[in-house]
Image (cartoon, coloured by chain):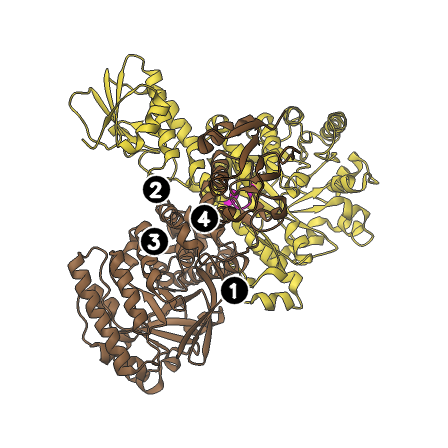
Chain colours: A brown, B yellow
Amino acid sequence: MVIAFESLYSDIHGRYGKLTVGKKTIKTPALLPVINPHLQLVTPKEIQSMGVEALITNAYIFSQSKQFRERALSEGLHKVLDFDGVIMTDSGSFQLSVYGEVSTTNTEILSFQRDIESDIWVPLDIPTSPASDRQTTERELSITLQRLAEAKEVFGRDAPLAGPVQGGCFTDLRERAGREVTDLGFSFCPIGAVVPLMESYRYRDLVSVVMAAKRTLSPSACVHLFGAGHPSMFALATAMGCDLFDSAAYALYAKEGRYLTTHGSFKINELADLPCACTVCRSHSAEELRTAPDRERLLALHNLYVTLAEISRIRQAIFDGTLWELVDERSRGHPQLLAGYRAFLKRTESLERYDRVSKRRFFYRGDESCSRTEVFRYQQMLSRLHIGEHVLVAFDGGMRDEFNDTLFFKPPFGPYPKELKETFPIGPSEIPDWDDAMVRKGCRGIKMLIESHPDSQFVVSCNPRWETIVRQELGDIEVCNDQV
Amino acid sequence: MVIAFESLYSDIHGRYGKLTVGKKTIKTPALLPVINPHLQLVTPKEIQSMGVEALITNAYIFSQSKQFRERALSEGLHKVLDFDGVIMTDSGSFQLSVYGEVSTTNTEILSFQRDIESDIWVPLDIPTSPASDRQTTERELSITLQRLAEAKEVFGRDAPLAGPVQGGCFTDLRERAGREVTDLGFSFCPIGAVVPLMESYRYRDLVSVVMAAKRTLSPSACVHLFGAGHPSMFALATAMGCDLFDSAAYALYAKEGRYLTTHGSFKINELADLPCACTVCRSHSAEELRTAPDRERLLALHNLYVTLAEISRIRQAIFDGTLWELVDERSRGHPQLLAGYRAFLKRTESLERYDRVSKRRFFYRGDESCSRTEVFRYQQMLSRLHIGEHVLVAFDGGMRDEFNDTLFFKPPFGPYPKELKETFPIGPSEIPDWDDAMVRKGCRGIKMLIESHPDSQFVVSCNPRWETIVRQELGDIEVCNDQV
């Protein structure tokens, strides 16, 4: 295979990996800045000097350009753009979605991508709008899938082809698309036509659509979230298993005088201060940036720096096993992103299956942390615990001789035997003062233990402060006061 | 007064302001980097080029230094350090807290600060450890207050004197200190000896201590949180009304190979990627930074950039009225900081009094947002609403003719008449899908409305999903199903 993906570390469904394209390798997650040959606020060479290993440009624009077409064909894309990393090319699908038609065909634009020596070629798929009805979506998906089959047939199994996953807002169609793209042998799979969802803050729908596609794509496929350029949602998308993003936002936003941050965007006129560590922001005041003759370029640079920094932050979080914490941090930045995050948390059971075993730590960040995979997995494990006939769950940690076993209690996980005190997640978890949500969740752990051990009898000893919750969750269990 | 403070914008207790010291002015909140004349990883001139307007150095070190004492006396501190902004000098109190004694007196070290032309002088106060008992704390506080009185007496009311607030962990002593420092006429007030609290993550105690001092300090005093250098807690401290921070951390951490972020610190050996937008991190890989010959200096630069960026972020948040959101974002970065934040949220009633009237927006970020000042204030206002005899609170927004008034419902605020639909906080608030916590809080708004309008009769129309919460909060109120 000319395109291969390897995951080195993982967290939730996020992967810290390596994408190999021919003889070139890039680290993932990665951002592919979008290069418009007609508008280069920042040159590919400058972008490469920032550590960028891959970029994306539009083959259709090249094919239609008097200025660039022949040069690209004769000199190759890498020489024209002066960039020797990985170059992915789009096919005109975007223009198709905007203008309704393009003056090329699937095999024509793929041949052009081959001839200009692009590293990753995209067939002329149809990016079906999320507003489309089922009939349209199905019809367009069939056309897309035919074109993907055609691409494989004409250019061979080893051509560096991307297999876009369409299907609009219908999760079963996204599942079908993922399955067929996998069956066709694609190992590089963009999830397409999600930009309208992101533009209208429909993050709950984005979670449905991406998770549906991921369910049927091969776990060894590299997944590109097509058109995702705002750093505020990279962490959530990574947690869902997306490996690549592309950003035209850095330049488009700059042209509109907009300033990207990981917690949203600002119009440059709204800024009293520049809330960023990048070299542009540390060497200009807000007023200086606003009135700079090269304002667009400076904004584009800033936008790139924060976006690339976020990719590094995500990579570090996967490496550490703290991606849940980063997703939590970013997702609270906009209430609709929080809605998407909460929808994502409802999928804990399926997320847990791929999540890694041990992590750097577990930091409790609020009630949402009760739904993390680590809590789910720990409570599942409780059924495998060997315990005696008379069991005390001691909230305060005090042991009593009249019981065969004393278990301790750490919310939101639940009961634990002393042997697990230092192991993940009990040991390396840090929680603030106990709150209702975490104690309630911990009681559900006790409940799972009780239900899976019908031959044991249980007593909970706790501070009266928690008795109501214990009784609500555990019914008529015997409770004694640990302050006696 | 030679030192004057002016607040231009405010949010919670945070101020976006201007501190005037003689003829110099600095923007606040501000970070004063600590300069050790013997160890300059980054020079004051470089620091000034990053936009820093004030720094702090230690007069006691100068007074004891063969290399610097005479030069400082003859050329002045600004020339020796090559910095023409505001220079604040500490008095040796830190050395007192570490070594138990210093070889100077209060008036001697103050005279020295005057003679080397420091812009802000600190008396030789006693930084009482938070571990000290009440008797020790009281005794040391009395000495500190005597020395402050002496300083005013010897150097005059108009000397640029700082008046540190001590009192250890005893909130009544911090209150007393704040009151007496104010009575002595100090308008620049460091809150002292809080470093041990921050080093041991005792953020709940930090909130108690700072809020106690703030209660009795003059609202027009500029408040410096002495020794606070980690950017993760600047937002919370600002929300409590702290205006200045000083950071030795940028250099000390760099010497220990530690990398600051707004969400905690990393040892440089733990980093696989550099999760930051600054020029150091965008031009080095983690491995390059680790092995760079000037690693300490590069780390110090990075640490300064992120710390200064956080100050800008805070200033922008105050300007926008989004400081609650920033405090929420940062405080979830460590469970003990979350504990401090939750303790701070319990003080909503007193915080509300100084909070500003209108803000850019209200973004719901989780259950903690229910305790924001804006929610408290809105619900207080409900008692002033004029309403008729028969009132419908319609969760779904549908009006019915049989009622004199129909109010709508927006959680977490509660009921609102249509006239308030567009005004703050009802209009510019954005919430995710309704959750239990916000609906419960909104019901408390209905309850306040009911209790303050005993002559009106109320009916709530809501989706059955919310009926349990409505009944729990509002007892035997009439509820009808809004889906009929």
Q: Secondary structure at mark 2?
A: loop
Q: Is residue B37 above or below residue A223?
A: above
Q: Which label is found at residue A207?
A: 3
Front-lying residue, B248 or A345: A345
Q: Amino acid at mark 1?
A: Arg
Q: Residues at marks 1 and 3, common chain?
A: no
In this figure, which residue is indicated by the disc labeled 4? A328
How busy is the neighbourhood of tag 3: few (under 14 within 10 Å), some, or many (20 plus)?
some
Distance (Cα) linking label 1 and label 4: 25 Å
Q: Is residue A408 above or below residue B71?
A: above
Front-lying residue, A89 or A1: A1
Q: Residues at marks 1 and 4, common chain?
A: no
Distance (Cα) linking label 1 and label 3: 31 Å
Q: Is residue A180 above or below residue B134?
A: below
Q: Which label is found at residue A240?
A: none
Chain containing mark 4: A
Q: Amino acid at mark 4?
A: Asp
